[in-house]
Each structure stands twice: as structure tokens, then as C-alpha cells.
Image (spheres, rainbow, N blue to C red):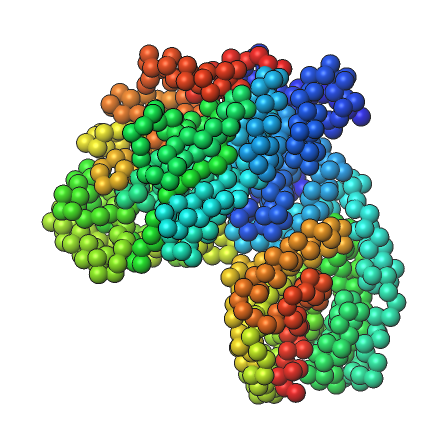
Amino acid sequence: MSLADYKEDVETCFGASCGFCERKCPVYQILKKKTFTSRGRNRAILGIIEGKVKPSAALAEAYYQCMLCGCCERWCALPDTEIERELRKYLVEEGFEIEKHKKNVENVMKFGNPYGKEDLNKWREGIKFASLKETDTLFFAGCTMPLRQPETLRRAVELLGPEKLAVMDEEICCGSYVLRTGYEKEYNELSDRFIKYLKDNEIKKIITACPGCHTTISEKLEKHGLEIEVTHIIQEYVEMLEKHKLTVKKLLGKATYHDPCHLGRLEDLIDEPREILRQISDFREMENHGYDSNCCGAGGGVRAAYPELSMEIAKKRIEEAKATGAEILISSCPFCEEQFKTIGGIAVMDIIDAIWEAVK
Amino acid sequence: MYKRIFYPFKNPNPTQKYVIYYNYSVSNNAQFGGIYVYIDKLREKLGTEKVLTEDFERYVYGADWSPRTKDEIFPPDVVIVPKTTEDVAGAVTIAYEHGIPVTAGGGLTGMAGGAVPIHAGIYIDATSMNKIIEVDVRNQTVRAQGGATLQEINDSVKDHGLWLPNLPESKWVCTIGSEIACDNDSTFGMRYGKILNALLSVQIVTGTGDILELGHRKCHFTSSGYKLKDLLVGSEGTLGVITEATVKVEPIPDERRVEMIIFPSMGTAVSYLDRLLKAGLTVEGAHINCKRRLKFYTHAYRKKYGKDPEIPDWAGALLAIIFAGDKEVVDFERNYALGIAENMEGELVKEREIVEGWWISKHTLEFPPFKQKWPDSQREKKFGAVDPGIPMGRLEEFYDVFVKTAEKHNLQILGMNAYLEHPNSIGFSLSCALFVDYHDQDEVNRYRKYFEDMAKAAVDFEGTMSTYMSDTDLKVPYFEYEHGKSTEYMKKVKELFDPKGIMNPGKKFKYRGGGK
């Protein structure tokens, strides 16, 4: 694919020019410049395709300030986030890279995670997983939970039963960060390794713990035509509750749920977490939830490259959560939770920990 | 590497050159003989972060929703994103000093290019001024900055049980300043009228940079002085930039019922509405769709069922009618109205999906995720309309003119809609719409010729060229066809507010040029 492949879409955006993408765009609502909206971005891409706009450092700076959260796309019928990803790919190819992204991508390629850490498997210590000869179900932990929420991850696996799950000896990064910051060559390299591993080991099912990994793995399997089931850990818990393999009590107080963009709006996993939370807490909704959920501000490399903007967006989401009267803000994404914990003002909990508390 | 290039667009005003300005800086300004010194002054006055000069930034602001090809995008030389009235006044003062064109815009969803900066210069993105300044619940008024969207105004008062009912379909992005400046229409016009009915006071920055408050504070009307505030409605920013406005808001009705009634002709639907008014009913909104037009408003229905809704062959018009208030009153008014309809050849549309599909499209905008109507229905051709007003008794006749004019220019008809926009009387705002292939310059040009023919026909029908888009640059060549000698008086009014003719030049009247 190239930017020119989206010519019809960006021309349609120019023709329709409805601007509905502006209303909920978390970045536009803070920065208030039309260049930051999907309409603005699509218009600029039209200009690039037509040779009337030249790529520049300023253009790259502007268009990397997007979390790829899909808030615009929810109110559109064009593949806005896909177009933005293509723009980033083009910018990288043209040499307009964001230094922080470049460094993190180098880390991914060297260490398997953007943080440049080497102890990704430490969380597994003492857990006895099944071997790939015993199961064809792979548990994929990702990189952020092992480093930032190792105890939550241990609980996740304990609830599922580690004896039914295999893990990669050294996880091959799903490439979410690399994909979303425009590094196609590196992403394809990671994907090829990932796909080869799945084929070589005849994996039939992958359970993910991180929403970003979930969408990225699903996307790459579809692209490669692999019929491997991918579930998020929440789906597993819902099934366990339905089959009474897991019993919970309403032990938590007033709680609300933040839909991670990659799980809710982009993967349609909206009802499942609520099914759980209604059983274990005094649950209440934020004004913007489900498809209309506001982003936490972490995605698309924004937290790494534009921390102030990222925090501003997170603050607004915290205010929404507090307005419900909730005492606990529950989510299911390590990035979202990290954002909210940094801002503070409300207790933040992963849904895995919430379930752990409820079955305790 | 700095360079100056000239835009390859057709220049409607040969005295002005379109300039793309790459990587503007003080150093390259010197190379250009200092003609962009005003941009330095803007930066100095407003701060660098409020002054945008990159080509991609300016390109974004070069077009609105109107039918145009991509070769007709007109980027301004510089975009400013002000936060306060003082920022706007500062920018306009600099523009006045240097004779630079100033075009202010909001959501850029205009249907005829009203906020497109066709003579370049400074573009003011008013959406950066979106503060709600005061909500006065006791007096039911809201004071907002000009860049607040109609939705943002409504969000600010909904918890008080109030709303601003002057709402076009673009309400999510249409700003209060734009609503006033282009004199937009509203879904609920038959009860609440157009924005002038709600507008109490307005603050503007004139073409010299003066800050003026026009209106009657929080009072609904006045008989003191000239009504200068009213001049702002439909002025398209040619008199000044609207920086703040006070509007009255209304109690939110508890209950609303939307119905559709089929009539054999548009004329019968008009007679029916007249009969309802005679009966003493209060109609919140009424829209007479010709049969073809309904298809455009049933996008949700088509998406769901994969087919167009079935309308009987005898149908000539579909009246969408809205009742709102207390439940008992709404039920009574609805039943009474339907009883009258039966005696006037009207047949209620019983398939609620048709009615609800129309209502989603017209007002709630609750499209299924990722399937919003506008981009989805505009891939090949887009909506293009002309907005004449005609007297109430001549709708049928004018419909024939619409069809014949569209056929004369070989354009695909989308349909006609008569919006009832005057409180408690039959006052039309017509939308005579086509599908326009915006990839084809010849078709866009034919659309503009159709636009001219229809505008002139409306005047011939003892009507008016425009009812919700204003004049823009399209009606400039035949402005006098409607206004005759009064055109000169209007020009003098503009000169009073805008002595150098720099405010949204080329709209309503020809740009006098000069300046930079």
C-alpha cells in the first residue's frame, strides 16, 4: 500500500467535508487546530498526492500527535486510522522521523520491547506452563505488562490455569508500536518471525493480555490468511464465569470502566468487561463509553513523543471517571492504567486484579 | 531552501496573486521585499503558536463543503488561531494597516464557499475561541465565544433543561459565529425560526479592528436605535468577525413525536400545514420532501435493508412533521393533525424505520459506528444545492422550474425540500439539490450555472436568491438582479464597518483589491 492507494478516500473526505471527526477527537479538542483532525490530515494527504503540499518536519510533528484511537472513525465511514498509519509510513520513508520513536523502534528490534529491557521473562518465575507438545494454545503476555504489572500478569495466568497454556521462550514482539509509528520494514520483519513461529509450532489459539497486542496479532493473522483464534483474556474470563469455572462476589465498591480503544472501539469487546464488572462491583458508566469512549492519551506513540499532550488527555478522562461518583477506575490495558496512575485522583485497577479480588 | 511559487489555480481576481508560502521566516521575507512583514507583526502580537504558515496548515483551510474540484482549494497566506477577542482585534488591526484580506471561518461546512479565503490573506480559525462565557439560567440566555459549536452551547445548558433549538444538520461543527454569519437554517424552524429569533447581542471586530457590541443585552427586542445587530445575520463576515454572541435558549420539551405523511402533491402538503396553523396547533418542525429527496435521507434505512423505502406511486410529497411538548399535548396535537390529514388526502407513513431513518439523518445523527452518512454517500458525487425562497403559493410551479433547470444543465436531480423556517407561518427555505461530480470541472461549472439560473428564477417568482447559504462569491455577478439600487446602499454599509474592504473580500461584492 502507499498513500496514493487512499486517493479515493481522501478525495471523498474532501468532497464530504462534514467535520464530524472534530467533535470527539481528543487531540483537536485540546489543540483546536483543524490540521489535527482527520479531515485536516486527509486534506493534507490530498495535497501531498496532488503535489501541492510537501512533507516537512512540521507536518510530521503535527501528524504524530494522534493516538490512532479511532474516535474520528467512529463518526466517519472512511478508514481514517489506517490512512494515518499510511501517512506515518510515508513520513518515515521520506526521512521525517520522531527521534523518540526511532529510539524505541531500535529497542524493539534489539530487545523485543520499546523500553530496551532484557528481563521480560522475570514475571514467569515459578509458574509452570505447559509445553508446546502438551497444548496448542499460546499465552501472549506482550512487553508492557511483564515490566509494569508483573503481579497482575501472574494473577491472570493463575486464574486461567497455566498448565493449559504455552508461552514463547522469548516472546517475539507483536510489533504494535513499530506498526503505529510508521516503520513498515521493521514491522514486516517482526511479523515474518512471528508467523513462522506460529506455523512451526502449529498454534491453534492465542490468548492476549494487552489490547494493543490483540489488535496487532489479529490484523497480521488476517493479512497472512492464518486461521488461528485470538482472544483477549477478558473473553476467557467471561466464558469461565458462564460455565461456572470461576465464581465471583460483589466485593468492590463504586467502579467505572475505561474502554481501551484497541479493545472497545476497534475490536468490539464492549459488553464482556461489563458483564464481569456488574457481577463484582457497584458499576456505573462514564458519559463517553463503548464505541464513544474517550482515549487515555497514550496510544500511537503520543505518550513517548508528546507527554504533555498525552497527560492533558488523560486528565480529561480521569475527570469523566470521577464525575460518575466512582471510587475505582478499572481498565484492561497497561498503557491506559499507567496514564491514569500518573495523573492520580482516583484508584486505578486492572480488570484482572478486580476479578482476583472478587474470587479471593 | 525557501521559495515562493504561484498557485496554479484560476485566479478570479487578476489584481491579486495567489501565493504559496513555504517555510516562512523573517529571512525569506526580506527576499520578497518585505511584503509579508504583516506575518511577523501577527507573530509578535499573538505569539508564534497562534500563527500558522506551513503549507499543509494553510491547505486545510482552503475549502469548505461546497461543490468544487480539488483544483479549487484556496489556501490563505496565513492562518491564525486566536483565543480572545483581543487576539482577533490585534490581527485585524494589522490587516487594516497593511490592507490584507481577512476571512474568518468556523466548522467549514458551508455549502457555497462563504468562508473560503478566495483572496488569500489571513484566515481566522474561530473554532479556537469556543468558551462558554455565561449561562444565565434565570434569564434563559447563553453568552459564548463565536467559535463555540451549537452542540457545545447545547451541552452547556442541557443540565438546566434548556436548549438552543436553532440547529442545522451540521450542529456538531457549525459554530455560533458561522450560524449568524451565514444565516443558517434549522430543523425546528417552524416553532423557533432562524437564528435571528434567538440572537440578543453580538460582539464583533470591525474591519478597522474596533470592538463593538451590537444588540439589546438580554432583552428579546428593542425599539431603540438602528438594529445594527440584525445586519450581522447573513453578513458572511464582510462587516466584521463575530467574536462573542448572546442567544436566548428555550426549555427542552419533555416529549417529541416525529411523523411522516404522504400527500399527492407538494401543494397539498402546504395547504395541510396552513390548515394546522388555522386549527391553532403548534408545529415544532415541518419539512416537505419531494419524493426523490427522501432517498437521500434514508441512508440508514438503505444500509439496514439494502433497498430504498417503498413509497406509493401516487405520492408527490412526504411531509415530515414534528410535535413537541408535554406528552398529553403532543398526543392531542398529533392525533388532531392526523385527523385533518385524512380529510386532505394525506396518508400516514406506518413503517417507522423510514421515519426514524430520516430523523437520524436530520437530527440525532446516531449513525451506526463507522457508517456515518456523509462520507459514505459522497464517494462519487456530492450533494450540491441552491437555496432560494419563494412565496408560499408557488411551490408546485417552482418545483417544475427546478426539474427543468437541472435537466437543462444535464445534472442528476437529488430532490427538493421545503424547510418551514418562520415561526408559526408558512415561510419556506428551499433546498433544490443535485448530485454533483466534484471530480469533473465541467460538471461543477454546470452546477454553478444551474445555481445562477435557479437564483434568478426565485427572484422572478417574487422571492429571494438565498435563504440559508447567503451570497458568497457565487452570487456576486448577479447580486443586483435581486437588490437593484439598494446594492449601493449595502456597499456603503460595508464601507462603514470595513473601510478598506478587507473583510471576507469577494463575498457579496467584488473585491476592490489593493493592500499588500
The residue at the point 53 percent across, 67 percent down is A324
Q: Residue A266 at what x, y percent from top left? A: 60, 60
Which is nearer the eye, A283 or B208?
Answer: B208
Q: Quadrant of the N terminus of chain B?
A: top right
Q: Quadrant of residue B222?
A: top left
> Residue A119, image x and y in percent?
87, 70
> Could you tell me which quadrant the C terminus of chain B lies in?
top right
| Visible residue check, residue A314 | yes
Q: Position of residue A10 (x, y in %)?
A: 59, 40
For image coordinates 43% across by 34% down, the residue present is B202
- What residue occupies the far left of the structure in this picture? B343
- At x 14%, y 43%, the residue is B278
Locate residue A21 relative to residue B477 in the image: left or right: right
The location of residue A151, given as percent across then percent down, is 76, 77
Q: Reply above or below: A51 against A143.
A: above
Q: Residue at x 63, y 44 (%)?
A: A31
Is residue A77 depicted above or below B85 in this figure?
A: below
Location of residue B189 by image quarter: top left
Asked whether residue B379 appears in the rendered view, the answer is no
Q: How many marks?
A: 0
- Residue A258 vs A187, above or below: the answer is below
